[in-house]
Amino acid sequence: ENLAFTAASITQHTDNPYRDPVPGVQLLHCLRQAPGSGGETLLVDGFAAAERLRAACPDAFEMLARLPRAYRYVDAERCTDLRTDSFPVLEVDGPGGAVRR
């Protein structure tokens, strides 16, 4: 079940890694606020998180920048099967280079 279509709380995640190309920027908006409390959005700076990982645990950073991983989303009720070719979680500009995505 896609949690985006429920009232469940969603933790930090990467949206749509199974799409090609992966969305670079997504804009979220609210047309009408539901009554009551909740609905807070927590945003994470993925580039800063990657740099913190590189400093704290270089082996883990290197693994995420080197080993490919495939992504897939299946919704049988909607006859949807989205997948990408394998690619590393982190894309880096060469050894020791800046995190690109």
Image: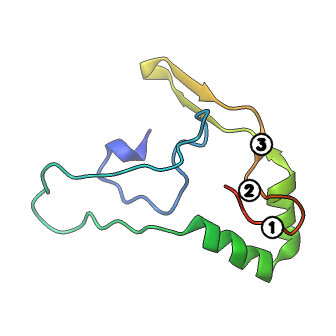
Residue identifier under label 1: 61
Vertically, is 36 above or below 74? below
The residue drawn where x is 62% and y is 74% is: 48
Image quadrant in which the C terminus is located: bottom right
- Between disc 2 and disc 1, whose residue precedes? 1
Inspect the image, locate mark 2, and give the three-letter code of the amino acid beneath it: Leu
Where does residue 15 sit, x and y in percent of width and height? 51, 48
Left or right of 14 on screen, residue 62: right
Task: Give the amino acid type for the residue marked by disc 3 in the picture.
Answer: Phe
Q: CA distance from mark 3 to mark 2?
A: 8 Å
29 lies above or below 74: below
Secondary element type, mark 1: helix
Image-quadrant location for residue 86: top right
Dot 2 surroundings within 10 Å: few (below 14), some, or many (20 or more)? some
Q: Earlier in the sequence, mark 3 or mark 1?
A: 1
- Rounded to the nearest angstrom, the CA distance separating label 2 from label 1 is 8 Å
Please rate how many residues cluster around mark 3, counting C-alpha atoms within 10 Å: few if below 14, some from 14 to 19, many from 20: some
- The residue carrying mark 2 is 90
Q: Position of residue 81 (x, y in %)?
A: 57, 23
Q: What residue appears at the point 67 percent right and 38 percent down from the top-left corner?
A: 71
Labels 2 & 1 near each other (Cβ < 8 A): yes
CA distance separating discs 3 and 1: 15 Å
Q: Secondary structure at mark 2?
A: loop
Residue at numbered disc 3 = 87
Residue placed most toward the observer, 92 or 55 = 92
Q: Position of residue 63 (x, y in %)?
A: 86, 60
Is 62 positioned to the left or the right of 28 in the image?
right
The residue nearer to you, when weighing 90 against 57, is 90
Q: Secondary structure at mark 3?
A: strand
> Which residue sits at x=36%, y=51%?
27
Tell me the quarter of the picture where residue 50 sits: bottom right
Furthest-bottom residue in this view: 56
